[in-house]
Amino acid sequence: MSNDVFGFVKTSIDAHTMGIYTMANLLRDCGYKVIIANNEIGEAVENLNKINNYSLFRHWIDSNNINRIGFSYRMDPADGYDYFMTIYELLRSDNMLAEQGGPIKELSFAGLPDACRLVSKKTNNRILVFPGNEPPVVSLRMYGVPENMLPKSLVSDNYYDKMRWDFSKKLIEREYWRLEPIQDHYGYEECGKDNDSYIARLNYAYRKHSLPIIRTHSGPYSENREEALKEYNSWCKDLAASKLLDVLSIGSSQLTQSNFGESWEGKSNGGGVPVNSEIEYQAIRHNAKPMLVRTYSGTKDVLRLAQIHERTLNICWHALSFWWFDELDGRGKNTLLENLKEHFDTVRYIAATGKPIEPNVPHHFAFRGADDVTYIVSGVLAAKAIKQMGVRHLILQNMLNTPKYTWGVQDLAKGRVLIKMVRELEDSSFKVSLQTRGGLDYFSTDMDEAKIQLASVTCMMDDLEPDNDNSPEIIHVVNYSEAVRLATPPIIKDSIKITLNALHSYRLARRKGLVPNMKYDNDVQCRYDKLLYDVREAIKLLESNIPNLYSPEGFERVFKEGFLAVPYLMDQHGKWPKARMWKTALKNGGVCVVDDDGKVISTEDRYHYIIDHMER
């Protein structure tokens, strides 16, 4: 079986890539070869009945010797079913399946539960389906991976993760979270007015001793753009009336980010709130009051979109992706250098507005298989650049459970190092707010399990700085339904209540000695010390060897030379071979760079190798 070649494919309009990367990483760790289809193939499977498109898809299979195909689609179940069944029927008609004497010995489908049920029914359960609630080791077993090839770290228990799960399971079963009172951060003078701001709300919550500020990201989906906007505006009013939510994060559509203000005729929009005019943004802002509002930046014209967000939304903070949402991930048309130049120009503009910036960076490296040091280093580089350009407040996002098979003790160590390195930048003119969240690929499709997971990851958020009741300053609540369906206001409100109840209950349990104080955990401390040393050395080497490091050209070179390891980057044109050359693997609950034999390569050795072989 180790000679099998897996080919994973998704449509280009589906931006949900975590499942594919996670599965590819796991299978590669087990010794399998995995090919991830590029955007050209993704576009072809959107309309596979076109002769040229099927020929392209068939060539991808043949040229890579693929004999096990996995298709992923985690948006509309009916669309996912249609896409997959088209693939299945065309392969059958072309005699490509093993039962017909062809090369394809297995087809699998990863999608929402409803789509999986449709596929299973139509194919009489001949297709392996992944609705999303499978633990990583179960997924591998479903693919038939022998026990002796499974990564040891996946089949062993971790005491910290088990403790949080047991604590959270009891909390959810008792349902006391339903009685969780609102924090009500709407009582300060500027609230809901034109001069309202994140800083004003933060200071009010500090005085009230009622942090964290709560943010959630949401939006309905409909093929009818006007209906989607109408529904979203009704959501805004509902959520504002609940007084549970501080920051409304608009789940904007791909076209909103890539083609704002343009004609969308003939373009696929995918999911998300389809905002396409300043008037539509203004309506959302009006209906969301007194909540604060934020949204994604653009994938082009980043500065222009930031200016639009300022005047239409009074955006509470800006989120910038620096290396991402461009040619690297297919989310935009900008080259990497063009994207970085636009981002640096936009940071300077935002600095003049006085608004905070959230560097939406480290987890995007993790999505592409980055090691834990790369995760931290990318965040530190972005924070230092932002401070150098005059921004006075930074929102530090730390996405936990990414990848989802990371051990909690490693997540604590990784998060604490990132927090320490960025908080060290604080002074009288630069402040940092920690924003934590659960991982995109973490939550189960079983709703009861997902509620427990939401409570469990909230406990870990509090363990990042366990002696600081003002940390985290912000929690981005990932709604418990998101592995299955978009979260509606009732689900959003319940998710916020679960989060707050878990946070308060866990803090009380720690004070009573009912759960361990993870500040003093030896395992976490050892991991922390090693990561901190590696990151400090990495930053020193970069600052000594990359001219004008904190610039678009410097950031491009850091990526181009391979300092930021992204082995699962979909580099369809072969532009970034050095970034992709490093292998990573799960080791002792964390992600490390390894050689061909699976032995860990130290960060210092790796960086010195790169420096010795850099273009001069």
Image: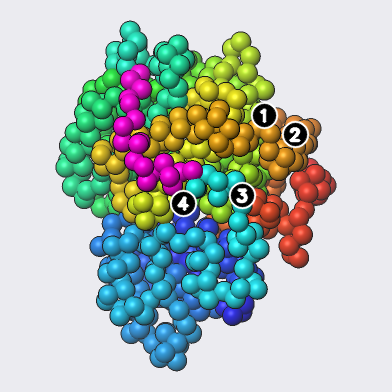
Q: For the residue labelled by badge 3, is the local secondary structure a helix, a strand or a loop?
A: helix
Alpha carbons under labels 4 and 1: distance apart: 26 Å
Q: Is residue 41 left or right of residue 268?
A: right
Alpha carbons under labels 3 and 1: distance apart: 28 Å
What mark, if any, has residue 441 been given in the picture?
A: 4
Alpha carbons under labels 4 and 2: distance apart: 29 Å
Residue picked out by circle 3:
159
What mark, if any, has residue 421 been given in the picture?
A: 1
Of 546 and 529, the residue lying toward us: 529
Residue picked out by circle 2:
536
Alpha carbons under labels 1 and 2: distance apart: 8 Å
- The part of the chain drawn in magenta is 167-185
Which image quadrant is residue 429 in? top right
What mark, if any, has residue 110 been given in the picture?
A: none
Q: Residues within 10 Å of mark 1 (few under 14, many from 20)?
A: some
Verify CB contact (< 8 Å) between mark 1 and mark 2. yes
- Position of residue 374 measured from the top left corner of the image (x, y, whole percent): 65, 43
Vertical order, 272 against 29 (above or below): above
Q: Residues within 10 Å of mark 2 (few under 14, many from 20)?
A: some
Q: Along the polypeptide, which appears first: circle 2 or circle 3?
A: 3
Which image quadrant is residue 409 in? top right
Quarter the N terminus occupies: bottom right
Q: Is residue 505 left or right of residue 386?
A: left
Q: Is residue 559 visible?
A: no
- Position of residue 35 measured from the top left corner of the image (x, y, whole percent): 54, 67
